[in-house]
Image (cartoon, grey):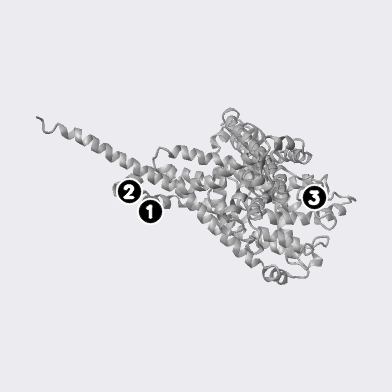
Amino acid sequence: MTVNKLERLRKGVITILMLAVSILFLLPFIWMLSASFKIEADVFTYPIQWIPTKWHMIENYTEVWVGKFPFYKYYWNTVKVTILTTTASAFVSALAAYGFSKINFGAGKYLFMIVLATYMIPQQAILVPQFILYRSIGFFDSHLGLILLSSFSVLGTFMLRQFFMGVHNEYIESAKIDGAGHWRIFWKIAFPLVRPAVATYAILRFIWTWNDYQNPLIFLRTDKLYTIQLAMQKFSTINGEFYSLIMAAAVSAILPLLIVFIIGQKSVIEGIALGGVKG
Amino acid sequence: MHPLQPAPAAAKPKQKIKTGSLQKKETIAGLLFVSPMLIGVSVLTLIPILATFMLSFADWNFIAGFKDMKWVGLANFERLFQDDAFMKSLKNNGYFLLTVPIYMAFSMFLAVVIDKHVYMKGYFKVAYFMPYISSIVAVAIVWQVLFHPSAGPVNQLLMSLGIENPPKWIADPKYALPSLMMISIWTAIGFNMIVYIAALQSIPRDLYEAADIDGANNWVKFKSITFPQLSSTSFFLLITGIISTFKVFDLIAILTKGGPISSTSMIVWYLYDTAFVNLKIGYASSMAVILFACVMFITLLQWIGQKKWVNY
């Protein structure tokens, strides 16, 4: 055998070994999917039936989506909160990032340092005052309050600032000579140039908001305002014995993210690799 | 008389006014652009952190209203370090630190293998990344079922392999914390691996070519090129990883609620329980201060360490 062939054989063997390891990561998901298709009595049969013998998929998912604890309501809440949070947070971050990188004003540097310093503060250390504040100004138990909590992202500002700094100043100077103000320069020139970075940030923020459990847990109380993460936990408490339904709920909660991830895979991976960012 | 003489003198102040007003305009524009962010950060982060510090010196039950607030000085902190439940939580946070080097080692290994030695790289990235993008609630609930003491697949498998009394996992005080740590490792690997893969791609290729000429084998190449070249990434992941262990909350809230017999209580869980279940605001705030101090200390360590220990 030539060296090249040997090399390819080795790569093939390692690929097969790695496939086996990757199964460890996917098995819980496969188990979840398979359990969501089963009748309750078959969920815990051993050896595990990966492909259900008695299909109960339509019944399970109908019960989850429009049954006693209808998921479509919580889905709508989550979609609303996630999209508004993502938009608001990307917009506020882009504005601030432009201001901190492309407008030359004395206080800018110091203000940026203050903003950046707040990144060190773990949210759990300020939960109690935030809660008291929300209770006293009436933002508690509202979607608006929940959205505002994640709309001012230091991370987003930092990330986008890096990209705005890469926009050449000549573009901005020449637009200024043509009489454009900063708002027009931002909106017509700078923002379109950094749009891919904004998209990357938006996808990450989408994933984090969709998956957020802690903030809805603390800042929402009324059932009908619940997001999907809270609803799922409630659902699993109510339906404690019905694992097939719980798994159908879990699949429903993960699916949209999986789709977003597969579509925006390159952006997500780049974004994470870029700053090694973490929710 | 030189009619032209006054002209430059007159032009100078005029120009000055012009640049001055231009600069003023810039400043106003700048402040307008950054003000939403500044206001948000001030109201939702800066004021609350000051409030946390103030409240940590108070004895206050939220229900009682502001007039029943009592200032107690450092009493909350004194009590904290005699509180067995808090010390236990702190200790559990200590144990949880172990997860960081473990998942970093796994991630680095997987990254090196996936980056160079396999086909279907795209598939592997998605497969290992699945736990990270999946909601922690869904993941936790699935593991809860998989770890079910009698009917769960994990124990079914162990029993069929002849282990008569498999551990009760999250229901067993001895195994509950290790179970949570395992789940946490499982979810963290994908994220760390992606960061490592990105870092691997920025290592100059000629280093490896030079090593090939010297006849170095894979292990030598890993030991003397890859590992040192990844040191800044490793350091970064170590720091962010340690910080994230201080913030562990979701898994505990969904799976164990700190139990059984507070074997899985950690700082943030105890803080949450004290503030939002027992409504002891002042006492919870003193824990928040400790949490803040821990994270701050590690961040400072990062600033110092980055200059000293990292081999670029």
Task: Please report the residue visible at 62 percent of the width from the left and 39 percent of the height from the top.
Answer: B53
Amino acid at circle 1: Lys
Inter-mark Cα distance, 1 to 3: 55 Å
Q: Are marks 1 and 3 on the same chain?
A: no
**Is residue B278 toward the left or the right of residue B18 in the image?**
right
Q: 10 Å neighbourhood of mark 1: few (<14), some, or many (≥20)?
A: few
**A147 over B177 or under it: above or below:** below
Q: Are marks 2 and 1 on the same chain?
A: yes
Q: Nearer the viewer, residue A114 or B44?
A: B44
- Farthest top residue in view: B308
Amino acid at circle 2: Ala
Q: Quadrant of the C terminus of chain B?
A: top right
Residue under mark 3: which chain is it in?
A: B
Q: Which residue is mark 3?
A: B170
Amino acid at circle 3: Ile
Do tag 2 and tag 1 residues touch (Cβ < 8 Å)?
yes
* Secondary element at image label 3: helix
Q: 10 Å neighbourhood of mark 3: few (<14), some, or many (≥20)?
A: many
Is residue B154 visible to us here?
yes
Inter-mark Cα distance, 2 to 3: 62 Å
* Secondary element at image label 2: helix
- Residue A150, given in percent of the width and then of the height, sits at 56, 51
Residue A188 disc label:
1
Is residue A170 visible to us here?
no
Q: Are marks 2 and 3 on the same chain?
A: no
**Is residue B158 toward the left or the right of residue B300 in the image?**
right
Q: Which residue is mark 2?
A: A175
- Residue A99, given in percent of the width and then of the height, sits at 43, 45
- The numbered mark, 2 or 1, whose residue comes first in the sequence reads 2
Task: Please report the residue visible at 43 percent of the width from the left and 40 percent of the height from the top.
Answer: A108
